[in-house]
Amino acid sequence: MSDLIFGKTWEEIQAIQQKQYKAPIVDINRPGDYGADPIGDGTFRMVPSGDIVDYKERCKRLNK
């Protein structure tokens, strides 16, 4: 069983409810992709490059 609720820990949810949550800052100046949008057919569009990749490549590029 996971300790996450919608991808957040209980402490993060409490901080959000109390308006004390600080989201992590994404450095958009670093080289490479920093995000991915699902397309719906099992592939992802990488941000900002726009490349269409599968899940394995998405994880590799995002270091996940």
Image (spheres, helix red, strand yellow):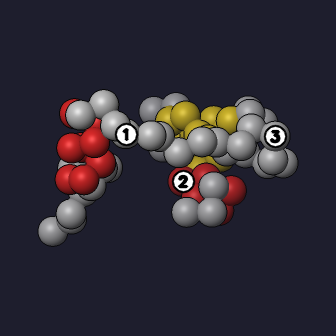
Residue at (34% x, 37% y) in the render:
20
Quarter of the figure with residue 64? bottom right
Q: Residue 28: which quarter of the image?
A: top right
Q: Amino acid at mark 2?
A: Tyr
Structural distance between the alpha carbons of marks 1 and 2: 29 Å
Judge depth for marks 1 and 2 and give the one in front. 1
Q: Residues within 10 Å of mark 1 (few under 14, many from 20)?
A: few
Q: Give the secondary structure at mark 1.
A: loop
> What residue sits 29% from the left and 36% below the top?
16
Q: CA distance from mark 3 to mark 2?
A: 24 Å
Q: Nearer the viewer, residue 51 or 14?
A: 14
* Residue placed under numbered mark 3 in the picture: 29
Q: Amino acid at mark 3?
A: Asn
Q: Of callouts 1 and 2, which one flags the residue occurring earlier in the amino acid sequence?
A: 1
Name the residue beneath numbered marker 1: 21
Residue denoted by label 2: 55
- Asked which secondary structure carries label 2, the reply is helix
Disc 3 or disc 1, which is closer to the eye? 1
Q: Amino acid at mark 1?
A: Tyr
The mark closer to the camera, 3 or 2, is 3
